[in-house]
Amino acid sequence: MNVETQPAQVTKKPDPGTAPSKRRMTARRRLIAAARNARELGSIASALASTSHPYMAHIVPMRRCNLACTYCNEFDDTSAPTDIAEMQRRIAHLGRLGTSVITISGGEPLLHPELDDVIRAIRKTGAIAGLITNGYFLMPDRIERLNKAGLDHMQISIDNVMPDDVSKKSLKVLDKKLQMLAEHADFHVNINSVVGGGIANPEDALTISKRALELGFSSTIGIIHDGSGQLKPLNERERAVWDEVRRLTRRSYSRFNHFQEAIANGQPNDWRCRAGSRYLYVDENGIVSYCSQQRGYPGIPIAEYTKAIVEREFLTEKSCAPNCTISCVHQVSYIDHWRAPQTSSITPGGAGHGSEGLVQLH
Ligand code: SF4
Ligand code: SF4
């Protein structure tokens, strides 16, 4: 039910289990969304006009996480937050390189005590500011602070309906947080569900996607592979859920379908990975890697990263590309799929290494 058509007659405290909770697109939120869309269109135009700047960077201000999903290799339970002044310097370097979109990743970024200043530093460069979080620390006042800091996008991955040994990123735990976001967030929210290795009930992904759409968010679906390092086709149940979620969320996929389709079928993709150039992964020590699964390559501090390196990596073929499941890098690389064949090659960490891990959709 669309709450915008209802008279405003709430006289008692709503029960979160029954209250209408769809995100309200007020005039103010529409204006914010229109401005964000205009900035995004500008960033795509700029990427089409020139190949010598990164389009997207992921930065890690906090490697520590409050959870411990068994498939994840991107967290620890000990590290301290990166100093805010150092984060601001790193973000300024991404700005110097002309980065269009800077997404804060982890670990769990909301554990960083000065996350709002990280977001402000991103917006200061003119980049679009994104945040990937498990959502556990969201509260109304925290969401309002993210609004004020200028956050543009948030993504939450929800792995199952009920928590289990693999993951506690569960709809049962997070639904109240989603309702808070629907009420308070001025930024765009995407809910990512998953199928594949380790996820017990593939049908959970459909439940999660339906709930995300019901609340007025966008929704995507990703694939988790097991630790064998090999692409495996989805089984029949997983495939049925995959097809249904894609049917429900087709506007979120557009032309990247063929890439995801090959992963679902366990087949390699033919594409040019532009990591190290159009996409940068800046870890908690400020070191630039191709992506979260190829850390240490090229292994250069962001402070020393130059346009010449961006241009070199643009033309460097990565041997892990055919079996890669890092969807955000594929989407970024798609901007240039029609131009600039790669003229040198590298084997970072061994062929096929990149086939492990969570497909991340942005
Ligand atoms: S997947 Fe996210 S929430 Fe889970 S352990 Fe890794 S960083 Fe933490
Ligand atoms: S794993 Fe994927 S994104 Fe990372 S360097 Fe290899 S091909 Fe590129």
Image (tube, rainbow, N blue to C red):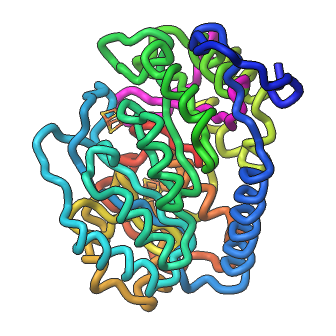
**Is 225 one of the magenta-colored residues?**
yes
Q: Viewer-proximal residue, 231 or 127?
A: 127
> Among all residues in the image, which is located at the extreme left?
78
Q: Is residue 195 above or below residue 29?
A: above
In the image, the segment drawn in magenta is: 214-238
Q: Is residue 8 left or right of residue 200?
A: right
Residue drawn 28% across and 69% down? Answer: 87
Q: Viewer-proximal residue, 279 or 316?
A: 279
Q: Is residue 320 left or right of residue 8?
A: left
Q: Is residue 50 above or below residue 318?
A: below
Q: Viewer-proximal residue, 216 or 266?
A: 216
Instruction: Report whether residue 351 is seen.
Output: yes
* Image position, residue 140 (x, y; %): 47, 36
Residue drawn 13% across and 52% down? Answer: 80
* Image position, residue 326 (x, y; %): 50, 48
* Image position, residue 349 (x, y; %): 29, 56
Figure quadrant of the N terminus: top right
Q: Quadrant of residue 221?
A: top right
> Among all residues in the image, which is located at the extreme front?
11
Total numbered badges shown on the rendered structure: 0
* Image position, residue 241 (x, y; %): 67, 17
Q: Is residue 5 left or right of residue 292?
A: right
